[in-house]
Image: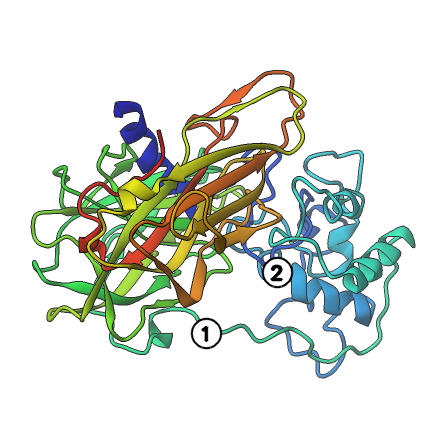
Amino acid sequence: MPRLLRLLPLALALATACRDDADDDGCDGPDCGATDGGSAADSDGASAADGEGSADSDGGGGNDGRALPCDVQDVIDRHCTSCHDAEPIFGAPMSLWRVDDWKVPAISDPAASVAAVAAERIVDPVRPMPASGPMPAEDLAVLQAWIDAGTPSDDAACGGNEPTPDPVGPEALPCEPTVEFVAGEADAPFHVPAEGADNLYQCFTFASPVGATTQATAWAPIVDDERVLHHWILFRTATPQTDGGSGPCNMPQDAAFVAGWAPGGGNYELPDDVGLELGGTDVWFILQVHYHNVAHHPDAYDRSGVALCTVEDPREHTAGIVTLGTLGIAIPPGAVGHEAEGMCPSWITSYLTEPLHAIASFPHMHQLGRKFRTEVLRGGEDGPADVLVDVPAFNFENQTYYPNDPEVLIQPGDALRTTCTWDNPGDTTVHIGEATEDEMCFNFVMVWPIEAVGQARQCGLL
């Protein structure tokens, strides 16, 4: 059990946004595109952000100096430029905005162009780009044909074809935020170092600003310096922290996941009759922010974080997080499709005082993860299965929550089976552990009423 307690806070920290820092591309949002390239600023021409190809350019109906064929530009705008924009954001190290951006040497392989490396990544079954999964076949064919042809330029007028994203942020919430947890201080934003912050986890700690009955009803990311922000996770803990503290993350064993965000994520709103428990006056909050300053910006000052709408009068139902999965991981060398199961047995759920309403899942594995599935076995381990969450193509670089709409009921006496599937191309057995070279198999499930679960909120892990 002590080992489990040490693992869970780290697993929660990784559950929303976690990535392989080796051979890094700097972006893991669902629309982030091909990677591992240099920047247009490295070529003989001007950087896309400095020239007429800028995202702010008003080209009056042309292709804004991007020189991309219109069908290629359409594919790139739908799958790549949410991170690899004219001015790269969310830690992406280079732009894919103009045709010239695809022709410079790749960072991971200077002997190859960005386009050549991208051609490999868009069909890579292990580390694909975009990180949300394979492009539709027709989009993939367009991009591959253009790369195979040598990434030719085209000055034809394409018109505006960038998608309009759903609004994200506190201003898009259906309520007025009442609580914020943000990096730095109002008059002193956190200075993200220009050096040594390629993969920086910085934690900001807060005394509880909420009352004993306060619940969260909705929350939104506050995205400040989007050039360097990679993701954030909000935890609560009963372990005393420094109010207004900032420093390297040293997560306490009892850290509990509250909310998280990564590029491509949006606002989150609970059903009208459900509020998320926040812990009251005797807890502290930890905002863990992952910074990714691979471009070495010297002027990165950040106040990113989260804004929450809260209520003092509890809603009818209180939600919280329970953890499913297994610690029994031993993936043999050379394994393909190796599975491990964690069973939350029916004898445990039989103690539930009423059914649980599962409203979202946050699956988590590491780099070798290929598939993830949690099923509800009705009436016990031998009963028929209903799917709680199914991720048939798990991607370590694009981990997110999966809402249940409609919610899934977990009845007393049901069993819950979580199955993780891995490939191990290495020559050593891989076990459970904190490092990305190790593995995990957890599903963090938001359920209500959390009081029906009690304090034992990990089920079937041992």
Could you say where residue 244 lies in the image, as x and y percent from the top left? 17, 47
Q: Is residue 293 left or right of residue 250?
A: right
Tell me the tag on residue 167. 1
Q: Amino acid at mark 2?
A: Asp
Could you say where residue 205 lies in the image, as x and y percent from the top left? 21, 45
Q: Toward which corner of the image does residue 223 lie, by quadrant? A: bottom left
Residue 434 visible within the image: yes
Could you say where residue 250 lies in the image, as x and y percent from the top left? 27, 32
Residue drawn 13% across and 52% down? Answer: 208
- Where, quadrant-wise, is the N terminus in this rendering? top left
Q: Secondary structure at mark 2?
A: loop
Neighbours of disc 1 within 10 Å: few (<14), some (14-19), many (20+): few
Q: Toward which corner of the image does residue 271 lie, by quadrant? A: bottom left
Q: Amino acid at mark 1?
A: Pro
**Nearer to us: label 1 or label 2:** 1
- Where, quadrant-wise, is the C terminus in this rendering? top left
Q: CA distance from mark 1 to mark 2?
A: 18 Å
- Above or below 261: residue 167: below
Q: Is residue 391 left or right of residue 41?
A: left
Residue drawn 45% across and 54% down? Answer: 262
Residue 229 visible within the image: no
Residue nearer the viewer, 65 or 167 = 167
Residue nearer the viewer, 268 or 179 = 268
Tell me the tag on residue 137. none
Q: Which residue is mark 2?
A: 85
- Above or below 116: residue 409: below
